[in-house]
Amino acid sequence: MKLTFRWFGKDDPATLQNIRQIPTMSGIVSAVYSVPAGEVWPEEEITAIQREAAASGLAFEVVESVPVHEDIKLGKPTRERLIENYRENILRLGRVGVKVVCYNFMPVFDWLRSELYKELQDGSTTLAFDNETLLSLDPAKGDLSLPGWDESYTAEELRALLDAYKGMDKEALWENFAYFIRNVIPTCEEAGIVLAIHPDDPPWDIFGLPRIITGAQSYARMREISPSPANGIALCLGSLGVDPANNIPAIVKKYGPRIHFVHARNVTWVGERSFEEAPHPSACGSLDMYRIFKALHEAGFDGYIRPDHGRMIWGETGRPGYGLYDRALGATYIAGLWEAIEKQSREG
Ligand code: DNO
């Protein structure tokens, strides 16, 4: 297991110096965030990330994310050029030693929450999702300003995009996904890179848009599309875990060799399709982190793990979900859990 930490670049209040001081931290997870989805990343920007990380003793082997342009998800003719660009990015990343590229295939919206600063009993704040609130919003009317969706769209662009998806069902999205995968996997193999798909967050349809990476059945279908290990999984415990029907240890058991990257975080189920993000330890939320990590260990997991979203604690301010302190606590919890599981399996 290699412990990593997400770093959003020079403007990230969590600095590389902060990150390197977290015990047993081996690397960062980052990306060129300044280039719009679909375009080619300048080589100098990629090498700059790697150089800066290395100067802090940190590896840069995981990219999150190389975003997939909406035209690829929509299956538009422009996808040819966009897929070509995607492949070029993969080749460039491979050349600087990147091993894993995380991405997602969610139409229009990335992760969504209804609240960014939900106050917990201990006075910390966390990200939360209340289904009633979500259902009462209509993004086409412009009454949406939620975290996780790309604010670079104007209201008009957003409406056009939502229209373009009208009538697209899950089957059509699967087809476009398969087209993308079949076209990029050979390049990944050539570049020594594996892809890791992030599950849809939350793992159900939102605003009438289809979502397909939602649980065990999604991974079975993915494997049918391409058997290559490069067609892999970013196991996000919090995304999958908000659906109590997702048995994460069973998913790990079945698809272990395909899991290249783990996002470790905990959630508390507070009602149907509603949840709050919780501190990482099992005792604080609805997920049994010990069982999940044990399943990963038993599956021989040797990939990258990063603590995912943390609460805002100790008065910290900054990018919601991505403060330094609570994620650092999560990192040490993960390291401790893993050490115990590893030694126990070795020593009996
Ligand atoms: C949220 C993240 C996601 C993730 C993308 C991967 O905090 O887990 O935004 O980076 O979905 O493509």
Image (cartoon, grey):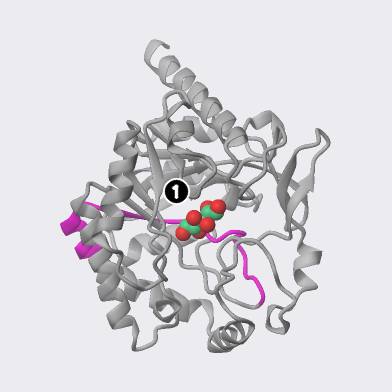
**Residue occupying image coordinates x 80% and y 40%:** 120
Q: Residue at x 42, y 24 (%)?
A: 24
Span shown in magenta: 185-207
Question: Is residue 109 magenta-colored?
Answer: no
Q: Is residue 208 left or right of residue 221?
A: right
**Res. 216 visible in picture:** no
Nearer-the-camera pick, 70 or 219: 70
Q: Secondary structure at mark 1?
A: loop
User: Would you call the spot at circle 1 few (<14 residues within 10 Å), some (14-19), or many (20 or more)?
Assistant: few
Residue 340 at what x, y percent from top left? 48, 18
In the rendered image, the vertical position of residue 214 relative to residue 162, given as above or below: above
The image shows residue 232 at horizontal and vertical percentages of: 35, 54
The answer to whether residue 31 is seen in the rendering is yes
Left or right: where does residue 134 sit relative to residue 161?
A: right
- Point out the residue furthest to the left here: 190
- Does the Cβ of the disc 1 residue fall within 8 Å of ligand 1? no
**In the rendered structure, which amino acid carries the disc numbered 1?**
Lys
Q: Which residue bears the numbered disc 1?
A: 10
Q: Quadrant of residue 65?
A: bottom left
Q: Position of residue 308 (x, y in %)?
A: 54, 43
Pick the residue in front: 227 or 55: 55
Query: Which part of the image, by quadrant, shows the C terminus?
Result: top left
Residue sitting farthest toward the front: 11
190 within the magenta span:
yes
